[in-house]
Image (cartoon, rainbow, N blue to C red):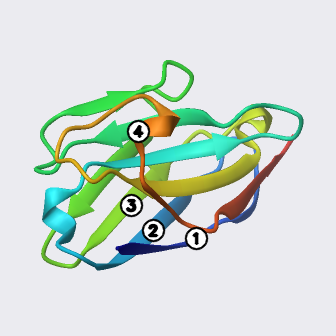
Amino acid sequence: QVQLVESGGGLVQAGGSLRLSCAASGRTFSSNAMGWFRRAPGKERELVVTVNWSGDTIYYADSVKGRFTISRDNAKNTVSLQMNSLKPEDTAVYYCAARSNPYSSRYTYQYDYWGQGTQVTVSS
């Protein structure tokens, strides 16, 4: 089992920045690929970014490429998402997720563990 707890959400003006963190506990974190997903009101959950176990293979959704940066620290069992140049369309609940697999995936159904989510609201 892996338990995931997100933090760092909040309200920010367009053009601002936020940093989300996800703390993992349970089984060995370094063997899990990780991802950040988001769900905007009235929309399906979508991938934001995924990273493999070592942090050297990263995939960003086109909508966040160049603005968001993921990082993971296997020694601290954390994965973070730095979000810059935020836009109102980034408003969503953001979820941290883990796979029982070291290789990253773009598909929601391939993630086995989920955090409770943290709200990000970007005002125009």
Which amino acid does the dot numbered 1 rest on? Gly
For image coordinates 62% across by 53% down, the residue present is 94
The local secondary structure at tag 4 comes to helix
Which one is earlier in the sequence, the residue at label 2 or at label 3?
2
Q: Is residue 56 above or below residue 81?
A: above
Q: Earlier in the sequence, mark 3 or mark 4?
A: 3
Label 1 vs label 4: CA separation? 25 Å
Q: Give the labeled residue for mark 1.
A: 8
Q: Secondary structure at mark 2?
A: strand
Along the polypeptide, which appears first: circle 3 or circle 1? 1
Q: Is residue 90 left or right of residue 56?
A: right
| Label placed on residue 110 | 4
Three-letter code, disc 2 = Ser
Residue 102 x %, y %: 16, 47
Question: For this view, does 66 lie left or right of residue 25?
Answer: right
Precedes in sequence: disc 2 or disc 1 = 1
- Return the residue nearer the eye: 37 or 65: 37
Q: In x, y percent, where is residue 107? A: 45, 30
Q: Amino acid at mark 4?
A: Gln
Q: Secondary structure at mark 3?
A: strand
Disc 2 target residue:
21
Whole-Å distance between the Cαs marked 4 and 2?
Answer: 21 Å
Mark 3 and mark 4: Cα distance apart in space = 20 Å
Q: Nearer the viewer, residue 105 or 100?
A: 100
Relative placement, left or right, of 66 versus 30 is: right
Q: Are marks 2 and 3 in contact (CB under 8 Å)?
A: yes
Q: Front-most of 19 and 4?
A: 4
The vertical placement of 102 against 120, above or below, is above
Q: Which residue is found at the position 32% from the left and 28% from the top? A: 59
Q: CA distance from mark 3 to mark 1?
A: 10 Å
